[in-house]
Amino acid sequence: MSRRAVIAANWKMFKTRAEARETCGRLLQLVGDVQDVEIVVCPPYTALDAAREVVADTVIGLGAQNTHWEDEGAYTGEISVPMLEECGCRYVILGHSETRQYLGETDQRVNRKLLRVLAGDLIPIVCVGESFVQRESGRVSQVVLGQLEKALDGLTADGLSRMIIAYEPLWAIGTGRTATPETAQEVHAMIREWLRDRFSQTLPAEVRILYGGSVKPSNVAELMAQDDIDGALVGGASLEAESFAKLVRFDEQ
Ligand code: PEP
């Protein structure tokens, strides 16, 4: 079974509503005809509906950068799954390393969020990845599979096939240092093997695993050429429509 490639833009805390509208409009001019790649943009919450005005009913899907696990309640500053669905979101990023580092995100909270997201219709993009020190001390599999084990606690293979996993080594995010295609492939293959052992024989063929960490037009093709790399979650290089469009057209660089 061949998995559909996904190229997702994480705009982090960048772009006003006007900028989001403009970038989405330009992006549509550049990649509006692309059919074989799932294109996702994840603006900040405040620009979600502005982006939706432009990308609704196009090849570009809308995603959020986080969510809460409750549908409503006294959680100041939070946004829920039904709110994101109402804004036209189809995707949501969970457990991004910056959310873990700056906002106290934990594997347990990611697990609660994932359970809630999978109970609805959104497609979760679950982020995992090791730090430089963890890699240097030979703990990549322990860290990455440990994060997945906790994030996926209580779930069965049923309904998990729409989940997307993003392997994002911390030392590569926003640093300009990309994992080599071989290094990334090794971890992606390990994750797929873990999905087989932990869930089912068929699940690994269905779950898309993206690489994230300084992906740019110059390195996307060699990453995408790896058997187990199904796409990319992109920060910096996704902010300009021209650059992001080149990533979406990775096979035509
Ligand atoms: C990210 O934010 O998920 C990311 C991978 O950022 P960058 O592409 O800038 O490294």
Image: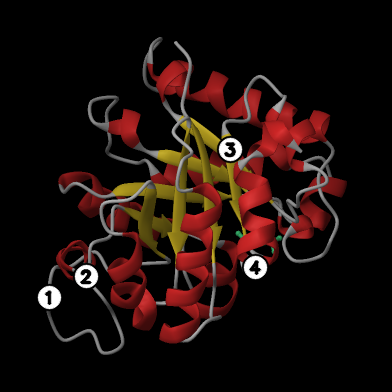
Dot 2 corresponds to which residue? 80
Give the crowd class for mark 3: few <14, some 14-19, many >=20 residues within 10 Å.
Answer: many
Q: Quadrant of the N terminus?
A: top left
- First in sequence: mark 2 vs mark 1: 1
Residue 186 x/y as whole percent: 73, 27
Secondary element at image label 2: loop
- First in sequence: mark 2 vs mark 3: 2
Dot 3 corresponds to which residue? 231
Residue drawn at x 12%, y 80% is 73
Secondary element at image label 4: loop
Label 2 or label 3, whichever lies nearer to me, is 3
Q: Amino acid at mark 4?
A: Glu
Q: Amino acid at mark 3?
A: Gly
Mark seen at residue 240: 4
Q: Quadrant of the C terminus?
A: top right
Whether residues under marks 2 and 1 lie with C-beta atoms below 8 angstroms apart, the answer is: yes
Image quadrant where residue 249 sits: top right
CA distance for labels 4 and 2: 28 Å
CA distance for labels 1 and 3: 33 Å
CA distance for labels 1 and 4: 35 Å
User: Which of these two is toward me, 108 or 77?
Assistant: 77
Give the crowd class for mark 2: few <14, some 14-19, many >=20 residues within 10 Å.
Answer: many
Dot 1 corresponds to which residue? 72
Q: Report if residue 67 is visible in the image.
A: no
Residue 14 x/y as whole percent: 56, 80
Residue 185 in the image: above or below residue 242: above
CA distance for labels 2 and 1: 7 Å
